[in-house]
Image: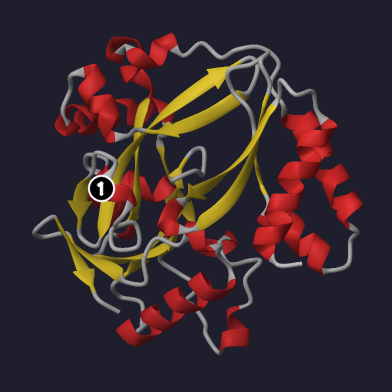
Amino acid sequence: MEYIEFVSKVVENIKDKFDPSVSVSVQNIVKNNSVEYTGLIVKSNTSNISPTIYLEKYYSDYCEGKSFETVIASIIDTYETYKINGDIEVSNFLDYEKIKHTICLKLINYERNAQLLKTVPHRKYLDLAIVYYLIFEDDSVGKGSILVKSNELIRWNVEEKDLYYQALLNSKDLNPICIEDMAIMFSDINLEEGGLSLPKKSMYVISNKNKMFGAGVIIYPNSLNTIGNILSDDYYLIPSSVHEMIALSKSNSVSCCEFADIIRYVNDTALSKEEILSNNFYYYDRTYGELKLINA
């Protein structure tokens, strides 16, 4: 069965399992780096929010030999596990004064997200883009995040620069910078398989306390200088993923070609496509306080 037919049959079968008042639909979901998924949305009239179930995994299960009936049962189990009972209060999201303390920033790849960036407030930073999201917590769904779209700026009557400075203000409390020794970073990645190796000293993992979208901490005021003070040297920044960077002292004997090979190897073997930040790397000059892009 081809994927399009599989999706159509899933919708038909899921509809048959629920009351006619329950809406069942599919939506094309575009994630970071323009990665697309087919999202199944089962929406009841008892809640104003519903989980999105991505069907790619279930199609893989079907292609690997699971019966269609088993796949349908698994999808329903997933829905029952994550369905929301009750409504989420959405009025707070309409009032900028009520939500501005939850605004954070993250870094994504500029070129890979060209279409997304047409719909969200952002600013270019080297080969990356700074975008904004809201952190929320609700008794029904727990913690989550919502990407800020351009139409929100109109509703809130604010500009991108307002989001930028508010996100910087919030960062020290919501997502404080975390700088850790490199020793544990590649413990589960076998670089030797790719004929690669990393130096053992003067390397640090740069992220935030929550380890989510942590590469964005390099935007924080004085963060680049702080890293330089720890290393006591100019340094390179390797974009390990959207969640962290690796800071490597200039004095380490690793060539630019080796950097490029390491980044590509990790991006190809250890990360999902959504987690990739860049194939390039960066150099921080402490004398001028400037971060420069090095094209790999």
Residue 186 falls left or right of residue 292 = right
Looking at the image, residue 15 lies above or below residue 86: below
Q: Residue at x 39, y 25 (%)?
A: 173
Q: Callout 1: few (<14), some (14-19), or many (20+) C-alpha neighbours within 10 Å?
A: few
| Front residue of this view, candidates 235 and 164 | 164
Toward which corner of the image does residue 194 lie, by quadrant? bottom right
Where is mark 1, residue-wise? 118
At x 31% / y 69%, what residue is drawn? 281
Please say whether residue 242 is visible from this viewpoint: no
Does the image show residue 94?
yes
- Residue 266 rendering spot, x and y as whole percentages: 52, 72
Which quarter of the rendered picture does the N terminus lie within?
A: bottom right
Residue 295 horizontal side relative to residue 264, left or right: left
Give the vertical position of 295 relative to 220 (above or below).
Answer: below
As helix, strand or loop, the secondary structure at mark 1 comes to helix
Indicate the amino acid at tag 1: Lys
Most extreme residue toward the left, as rendered?
288
From the image, which quarter does the C terminus lie in? bottom left
Q: Residue at x 51, y 11 (%)?
A: 89
Q: Nearer the viewer, residue 64 or 5?
A: 5
Q: Percent x, y for residue 291?
A: 19, 60
Image coordinates for residue 67, horizontal then vertical, percent: 91, 59
Could you say which quadrant of the image residue 138 lies in? top right
